[in-house]
């Protein structure tokens, strides 16, 4: 029986919203309906039809679905069979059926009668977003392809195409027969044809048919959209699908790399000359003639086609990259002239010289041509005049100008050839790099370019209007503040910039292809991006050397002599500032590395005045600061000591900025100790049972007694003697003491019950594991935990309450257990000779009085 319960709608009009996504036929019908509807408003008291949802069979049993219908306030009824619809049908309602399965017989019967059918995800999605139900003349199960316009190419089986089109319609997508600018995705079964070429040229994503099938499998997921990048990128047609490549003219390393890239990009490769090959990729700078006559079906293309396809993430058109033999008449003539073998003929020598000059004019052999992008720099209005008598000062000034001009051209090449294309919006295949990666790589290069463009212009004006008395030093003094601002941010992070380039080139094939294409251009002079970016690091020292040379060739009476000295001094200040800033930056980076590596590291470790001095790997020899045998790392800073142990189990990962993933923290924070708390540093003597051991006597402010921490060094590269001296020097600096040596004491291991015997034995490791497990069980089943500090106060109180009698032997034992070792810290030590006897007298007391570091 049908459920006759009907929820009345709060509005008289239909709750279906027109999504305006129809094909041409539906659009015409919609326009007619709009005209009829607008005309109906003119008539008075026309009956209004209300939308009603009918939950068919299983849909009526979904509580979540019924709750969503109540939220959007749409009337609904339940229906078990189609026969019941006759009793439910009414001219007052426009019925919309909710069907769980779009492949059963009930759905087919309803679809034949042209009823409107929607799936449960549509209702749930509208209820979640508070939107009205979308209008669709076709059955709509979900909205995961809503607002997508698809076009198909390369499908030969009609049944497969009909199936794909039906699924797209069920998910809210629209199909277009012909490809146009409104198409958002091309579904391709091959990499040939006009539609494929147009999609590549427009940068339209080209998808496999699996994309539609997988999207349909996720049809019941709320908020799922088939066009999101993470999902869509799994099903994009790779650039070399259906392609079999062979490579000619490349080194073995390059060939291996390109073969691996071919596999990654969906293609295959075969040896040169195999008839199954579809493409022959040629290194045009090496290969002058093909070893065989290629067939008409074989594309012979330059390497730029290969890298360009990877960069665009789609197979590029071959016609633009066809390989052609360099067989021009001009080149033949030049070669014939260069092949002269009679050097005794002056006329032939002259002709050879003219030919070389001609070639140099026709082919710019300079790695950095004087022409720079128009958007980066202006062309020189005047050519550099050559004085009749060239002085040595003028020659150096000219060299300074030429090197500055070349440097500006290099910066312009970096910006125009690399940075600008990477920052461009609407890149084919999406952004090649993330914005933060681009910022890391290029840093303040544009600012450096602006400053040096001004310097170059000023030098050009000086050279054009040359006079021996004109000052070159004033130019660099004028821009010294700008140099201080622009260079440190780039130079300090150059290593990070280089590491980012290397990492992105390995992890991102499109960026690797982008570099290959641009680095092969003549503007780069066959230099990589890393090699170009190192120029700013080298420029200021080069300028300082040229200014020094200029000063040597400047007369004493010339006013520029003193100005040049000031300019050289200002450049040295800039370089000193860079080095100092770099040192601070590296120090801060080291502290951040410690914070990332140590789980639970206190935030107050980060400080502008703090720097990492040394890292030492040790093993704990006592029960403090952690269990005996635990691996402990000591981070010595200039004013504190961070103590951390190795984590037993790594859980989770450190969250880092988008696009970066840091490894999980490998250490666990134990204690951050100011160096002022270290009272003595004990150098434990070497014995058969004790090697490389030392101890620290510390006095935490929360404790009433000193604490003894003992360790065994496991770092082989740092001798123990050097480590202890380094530690004492920084402790002395912290407490403002000049005699750092007096902080070190030699001691016997027996005095402190310190030994390193069997630390790495299997039995010792098993014992530590059992002890650790026992502690965990004890904590788990302990119901009354008495803090040691409270217990100690209670014992001391009970002791002081006994008045009028001498302490018994038990009382003396308690007092010895609670006595402090602070007397050791306060003993004057003019020499180390008397210290061992003191340790012998106090060894029993000290071993018992050592308390916990909390």
Image (spheres, rainbow, N blue to C red):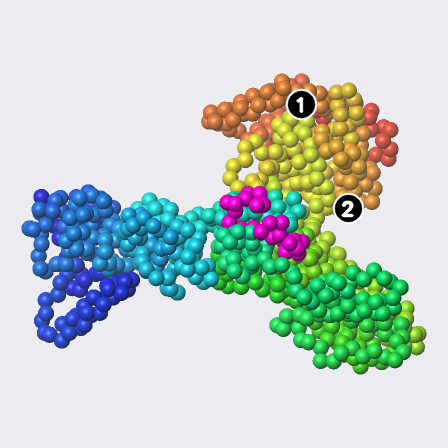
In the displayed image of the protein, which residue is found farthest to the right? 556
Q: Image point 87% across, 62% down: which residue?
A: 343
Please provide percent x and percent y for residue 484: 72, 65
In this rendered view, identify the residue nearer to me: 584 or 398: 398
Residue 437 visible somewhere in the drawing: no
Q: Image point 20% across, 50% down: which residue?
A: 98
Which image quadrant for residue 324?
bottom right
Quarter holding the C terminus is: top right
In the displayed image of the protein, which residue is found farthest to the left? 87
CA distance separating discs 2 and 1: 36 Å
- Mark on residue 733? 2
Please provide percent x and percent y for residue 23: 27, 62
Quarter holding the N terminus is: top left
Residue 85 visible somewhere in the drawing: yes
With 75 as the anchor, is 503 left or right in this view? right
In this rendered view, identify the residue nearer to me: 225 or 582: 225
Task: Determine the secondary structure under disc 1.
Answer: loop
Q: Please report contact status of discs 2 and 1: CB closer than 8 Å, yes or no.
A: no
- Magenta residue span: 269-293
- Crowding near pointer 2: few (<14 within 10 Å), some, many (20+)? some
- 720 vs 636: above or below: above
> Which residue does the numbered mark 1 point to in the structure image?
760
Task: Determine the secondary structure under disc 2.
Answer: helix
Which image quadrant for residue 665?
top right
- 572 vs 702: above or below: below
Q: Image point 18% across, 68% down: which residue?
A: 33
Please provide percent x and percent y for residue 365: 73, 64
With 680 as the anchor, is 31 left or right in this view? left
With 357 as the anchor, is 288 left or right in this view? left
In this rendered view, identify the residue nearer to me: 699 or 231: 231
């Amino acid at each position: 029986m049908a459920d006759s319960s009907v929820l009345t709608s709060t509005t008289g009009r239909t709750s279906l919203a027109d999504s305006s996504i129809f094909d041409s036929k539906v659009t015409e019908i919609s326009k007619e309906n709009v005209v009829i509807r607008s005309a109906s408003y003119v008539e008075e008291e026309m009956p209004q039809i209300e939308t009603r949802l009918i939950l068919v069979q299983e849909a009526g049993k979904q509580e979540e679905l019924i709750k969503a219908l109540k939220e959007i306030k749409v009337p609904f009824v339940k229906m078990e069979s189609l026969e019941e619809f006759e009793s439910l049908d009414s001219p007052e309602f426009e019925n919309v059926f909710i069907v769980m399965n779009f492949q059963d017989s009930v759905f087919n019967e309803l679809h034949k009668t042209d009823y409107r059918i929607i799936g449960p995800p549509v209702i749930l999605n509208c209820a979640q977003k508070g939107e009205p139900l979308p209008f669709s003349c076709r059955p709509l199960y979900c909205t995961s392809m809503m607002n997508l316009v698809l076009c198909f190419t390369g499908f030969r089986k009609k049944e497969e195409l009909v199936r794909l089109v039906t699924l797209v319609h069920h998910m809210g997508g629209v199909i277009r027969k012909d490809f146009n600018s409104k198409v958002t995705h091309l579904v391709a079964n091959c990499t040939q044809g006009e539609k494929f070429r147009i999609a590549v040229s427009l940068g339209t994503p080209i998808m496999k048919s699996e994309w539609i099938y997988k999207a349909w499998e996720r049809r019941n997921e709320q908020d799922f959209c088939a066009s999101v990048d993470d999902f869509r990128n799994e099903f994009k047609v790779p650039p070399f699908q259906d392609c079999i490549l062979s490579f000619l003219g490349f080194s073995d390393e390059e060939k291996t790399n390109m073969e691996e890239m071919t596999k990654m990009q969906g293609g295959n490769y075969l040896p040169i000359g195999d008839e199954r090959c579809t493409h022959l990729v040629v290194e045009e700078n090496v290969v002058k003639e093909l070893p065989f006559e290629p067939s008409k079906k074989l594309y012979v293309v330059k390497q730029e086609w290969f890298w360009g396809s990877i960069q665009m993430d789609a197979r590029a058109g071959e016609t633009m990259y066809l390989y052609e033999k360099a067989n021009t008449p001009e080149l033949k003539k030049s070669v014939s002239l260069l092949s002269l073998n009679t050097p005794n003929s002056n006329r032939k020598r002259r002709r050879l010289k003219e030919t070389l000059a001609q070639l140099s004019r026709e082919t710019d052999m300079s790695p950095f041509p004087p022409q720079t992008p128009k958007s980066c720099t202006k062309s020189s209005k005047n050519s550099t005049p050559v004085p009749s008598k060239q002085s040595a000062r003028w020659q150096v000034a000219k060299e300074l100008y030429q090197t500055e001009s070349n440097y500006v051209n290099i910066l312009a090449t970096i910006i125009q050839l690399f940075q600008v294309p990477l920052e461009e919006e609407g890149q084919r295949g999406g952004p090649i790099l993330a914005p933060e990666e681009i910022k890391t790589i290029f840093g303040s290069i544009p600012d450096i370019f602006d400053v040096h463009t001004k310097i170059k212009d000023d030098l050009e004006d000086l050279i054009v209007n040359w006079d021996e008395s004109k000052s070159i030093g004033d130019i660099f003094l004028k821009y010294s503040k700008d140099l201080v601002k622009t260079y440190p941010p780039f130079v300090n992070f150059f290593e990070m910039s280089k590491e980012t380039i290397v990492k992105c080139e390995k992890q991102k094939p499109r960026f690797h292809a982008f570099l290959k294409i641009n680095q092969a251009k003549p503007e780069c002079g066959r230099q990589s991006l890393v090699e170009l970016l190192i120029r700013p690091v080298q420029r200021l020292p080069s300028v300082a050397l040229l200014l020094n040379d200029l000063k040597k060739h400047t007369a004493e009476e010339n006013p520029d002599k003193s100005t040049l000295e000031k300019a050289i001094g200002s450049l040295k200040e800039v370089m000193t500032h860079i080095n100092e800033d770099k040192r601070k930056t590296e120090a801060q980076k080291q502290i951040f590395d410690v914070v990332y590596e140590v789980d639970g590291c206190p935030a107050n470790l980060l400080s502008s005045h703090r720097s990492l001095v040394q890292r030492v790997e040790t093993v704990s020899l006592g029960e403090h600061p952690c269990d005996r045998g635990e691996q402990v790392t000591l981070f010595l800073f200039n004013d504190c000591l961070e103590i951390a142990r190795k984590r037993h189990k790594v859980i989770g990962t450190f969250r880092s900025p988008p696009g970066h993933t840091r490894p999980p923290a490998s250490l666990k924070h134990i204690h951050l100790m100011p160096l002022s708390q270290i009272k003595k540093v004990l150098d434990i003597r070497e014995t058969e049972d004790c090697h490389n051991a030392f101890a620290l006597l510390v006095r935490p402010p929360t404790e009433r007694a000193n604490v003894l921490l003992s360790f065994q060094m496991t770092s082989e590269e740092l001798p123990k003697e050097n480590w202890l001296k380094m530690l004492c020097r920084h402790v002395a600096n912290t407490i403002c003491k000049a005699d750092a040596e007096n902080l070190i004491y030699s001691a016997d291991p027996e005095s402190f019950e310190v030994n390193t015997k069997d630390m790495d034995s299997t039995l010792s490791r098993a014992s530590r594991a059992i002890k650790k497990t026992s502690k965990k069980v004890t904590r788990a089943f302990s119901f009354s935990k008495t803090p040691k500090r409270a217990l100690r106060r209670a014992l001391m109180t009970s002791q002081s309450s006994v008045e009028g009698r001498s302490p018994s032997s038990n009382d003396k034992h308690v007092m010895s257990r609670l006595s402090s070792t602070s007397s050791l810290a306060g003993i004057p030590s003019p020499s180390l000779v008397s210290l061992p006897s003191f340790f012998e007298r106090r060894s029993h007391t000290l071993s018992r009085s050592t308390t916990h570091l909390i």
